[in-house]
Image (spheres, rainbow, N blue to C red):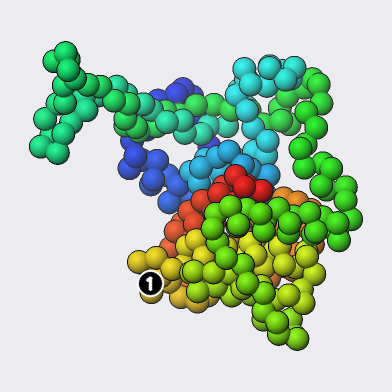
Amino acid sequence: MATLTKTKTRFVSFKEASNQTKEIVEKLQAEIISTKKSDKFQDYLKFLSTQTAYSINNTLLIWVQGGNIVRGGKAWKKINRDVIDWNKKIFIFAPKIKEVEKLNEYLQPIKDENGQIVKESRLIGFQEIFVFDISNTKGDPLPVNPLKDTWELSETVKGQKLWSKFLKAMDKKGIVIEFLKDGNTSLKGSTNGKKININENLSDHDKFLTGIHEYTHYLNHFNDDRSTLTKEVKELQAESVSYVIAKKYGLKSNSIEYCALYHKEHDLLDSFKVIVKTIKEINDFM
């Protein structure tokens, strides 16, 4: 695993942050293509199943630096854990916000009723900050994982509970779920961007993971750029999201050969962005 060494925090422009992320992904993609193995990609997906709060930039930075569960020194202190070696830093990006003048459509400052120029907060770039992995801390055990009760359930009961919660979330979003009354389960599900179809003969476990798969299509593959993505890339994105969510809840998931879906001309970073964005949204309602 590569080690990135930083000595002090500094300002990072949008372009530099983007280039750094792109460089990491290009190295990963080159390794996958050259070795014809998907191990690295699956490792990253497994890592994603433990992350809920970080952006695509930061998940990649934490992963490439060998991190797992990370927090800042003060955050560890709040749960009675101490950093062992402050030199073993993992750097990530934090938003850099600045108060600037609010401009109108003619790029002129807007004034309030008292003639004072209105200010607004604007993201101008990023600041490098340091966090520390749990392996580099000592102290009290971590708070109980909120998913612990779910993990300890049987596969059948887990499937029932997760499928029920998924259906309620879709209903709240106004997304119609219809059931395919096909006797065979070879076609598990589908979507046309307006509703999601699920084969009624599947187990609740499979209905849930199929629902996650089709929701990824629903959310990402019926917009303006859908024609630029191949079927293989769309399936890569949907299967990856389903795989990560399965790992998160301790569900069995058939491992697919992700490598077969790779093409040199496809920008893997674009898929990572879709995968991370979709997982974060699903985490919000699951």
* Residue occupying the point 80% across, 59% down: 160
Query: Can residue 168 be seen?
Result: yes
- The answer to whether any part of residue 33 appears in the image is no
Q: Nearer the viewer, residue 261 or 207?
A: 207
The quarter of the displayed image where residue 14 is located: top left
Residue on which the image places disc 1: 228
**Residue 258 point in image, percent of width and height:** 62, 69
Look at label 1 and name its amino acid. Thr
Above or below residue 62? Residue 242 is below
Q: Residue at x 75, y 17 (%)?
A: 80
Q: Is residue 127 left or right of residue 103?
A: right
Mark 1, secondary structure of its residue: helix
Left or right of residue 123: residue 31: right
Q: Nearer the viewer, residue 95 or 263?
A: 95
Q: Is residue 229 left or right of residue 36?
A: left
Task: Give residue 9's position: percent from left, percent from top.
Answer: 45, 24
Residue 117 picture location, percent across and down: 18, 19
Residue name at image x 65 percent, y 65 percent: 211
Residue at 34% over, 32% down: 123
Within 10 Å of disc 1 (Cα), the crowding (few <14, some 14-19, many 20+) is few
* Residue 131 x, y percent position in the rendering: 59, 28
Using the image, determine if residue 98 lies above or below residue 69: above
Residue 143 image-quadrant placement: top right
Residue lying at the far bottom of the rendered structure: 183
